[in-house]
Image: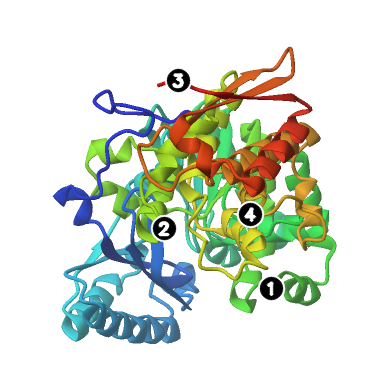
Amino acid sequence: MKTVTSANETGSFGLSLFDDPSTRALSRVGVVDVGSNSVRMVVFDGAARSPAYFYNEKIMCALGAGVSETDNLNPKGRDRALAAMIRFKHLADGMGLSELTVVATAAVRDAQDGPAFCADVLQHTGLHVWVIDGKEEARLSAQGVLLGWPGAYGLICDIGGSSMELAEISEGRVGKRLTSNLGPLKLQGLSGGHKGRKAHIKETIASLVEQMGAQRDRLFLVGGSWRAIARIDMHRRGYPLHVLHEYRMTPAHVSRTAKYIAEADIEKLRSACGISSARMILVPLAAIVLKQLVKAFKPTDIAISSYGIREGLLYEQMPQRLRDRDPLIEASRFAENKDARMPGFGKSLYDFVLPLFKSAPETRKRLVKAACLLHDVSWRAHPDYRAEVCFDNATRANLGGLNHHERIFLGLALLYRYSNTREGTRFEELYTLVDEKTQLEAEVLGKAMRFGAMLWMEKGAERATFKWYPKKRILELRLTHDALPLFGEVAKARLKSLASSLQAELVVKTRKD
């Protein structure tokens, strides 16, 4: 992923946008996605560039079930969807939302009674339903992916109940877009049985390949059926970090998991993976589609995105300067501003530890920056559990622009911020997701932050600097006279622990200012 930074930003952290009116206006945004299988309301809150989910509720309605045969929405699903919309409107009013944006996709746009359903929603709730076509659905889904990965490139594939959309992304832009009828609910209604469905899937995807052209980059998967397959892939592989966003699969993983699903007792597999019955019914057909999709487009790798249409609607409202910001850094800055004991100190800490990572690539320095911003946000946790809380928050928090390896690095660094050792924690199996070199770098960062936090508790102060000579294995600390009283027994022990992790000789000097 390439992170884009605005040209008018200055310094290692850029300028804060929290107080900008156009940013503050996005602090709480509500959207409803009326899909073919589910109706979901999400209210975003917090850091507008990498928002938290203030409220998130989904009702499985199966609006699109039977549309192919009857040309009308599923009657029971229609009643449930209308009831859900009435509930969502009451919730939005209670939360003080100024607006609730509602979009409807394939089922409503394909059904003859789709307009009547929209009229019922308007009559009962006062909400206008925006019925979007397939290409617009693809564009919004792609924008949702860009919310999490501003510099992402590759092919977006969003599967719903009644359709499947494709979109290219590159350089922060959405390119060519296509839509198809490969949603599992629609495939259920095809004649010809299993063989007929497989032939239709193969033929349709071949046509998509011909129209879309070569796509050998990353394939981003958006949609509940893809997430269910990813959860099954995790189960099959014994993968320890159960975070779907940015979970990676290879083409070989997809092939093996599709076979695993085809041969499994579906009810036992559903129960083992915690997938709803309504979703699991669609998984076997979705797995056939995914296997053929990967075979035809030949992506280098496959990433699961929990961000889609709803996040794309939020992205739609962002000014470009906010879109260009790094979602991880913005979320970390927001957390520091809200929860740290000394907001703004993260930058001082970053400047202090940076000499230890002078030759590191920008992707690593980005994580160092995030760690320094987050180093103190969990201080309210009980001291006996603070290190574990830090690790748990970093690895499982809703953070964009962060893959699983980076989550583990960040979690380990924050764990070492509050503990001199990681032994005896309940996260042992997660550490193995990164190599020993990465584990050591996280340990060094955590211990450097642990020591640095003892020397000053105010932003902007410069009481100490590090000099690191990696070839000579010499770690030099230079202290100002003002800092000498702070360099007490505990601080010395923490510095010695850092030097030990670096396998370095320690030199302490007094700096003349």
The residues tagged by marks 1 and 3 sit, at their Cα atoms, a distance apart of 62 Å
| Sequence-wise first label, 1 or 4 | 1
Q: Which element type, helix, strand or loop, lies under badge 3? A: loop
The residues tagged by marks 3 and 2 sit, at their Cα atoms, a distance apart of 30 Å
Q: Is residue 418 visible?
A: yes
Q: CB of mark 1 within 8 Å of CB of mark 2?
A: no
Query: In this rendering, would 117 be left or right of 163?
Result: left
| Sequence-wise first label, 4 or 3 | 4
Label 2 crowding class (10 Å Cα cut-off): few <14, some 14-19, many 20+?
Answer: some
Query: In this rendering, would 381 be left or right of 21?
Result: right
The circle drawn on residue 341 is 2
Residue, disc 1: 274
Image depth: mark 1 or mark 3 in front: 3
Image quarter hosting the C terminus: top left
Amino acid under disc 2 = Arg
The residue that appears at 24% across and 71% down in the rendered structure is: 115
Amino acid under disc 3 = Lys
The circle drawn on residue 418 is 4
Q: Is residue 281 visible?
A: no
Q: Position of residue 153 (x, y in %)?
A: 48, 31
Amino acid under disc 4 = Tyr
Front-most of residues 17 and 448: 448
Q: Which element type, helix, strand or loop, lies under badge 2? A: loop
Q: Position of residue 271 (x, y in %)?
A: 74, 76
Dividing the picture into quadrants, the one containing residue 461 is: top left
Q: Which element type, helix, strand or loop, lies under badge 4? A: helix
The residues tagged by marks 1 and 4 sit, at their Cα atoms, a distance apart of 34 Å
**In the figure, 410 relative to 211: above or below?**
below
Front-most of residues 416 and 495: 495
Amino acid under disc 1 = Gly
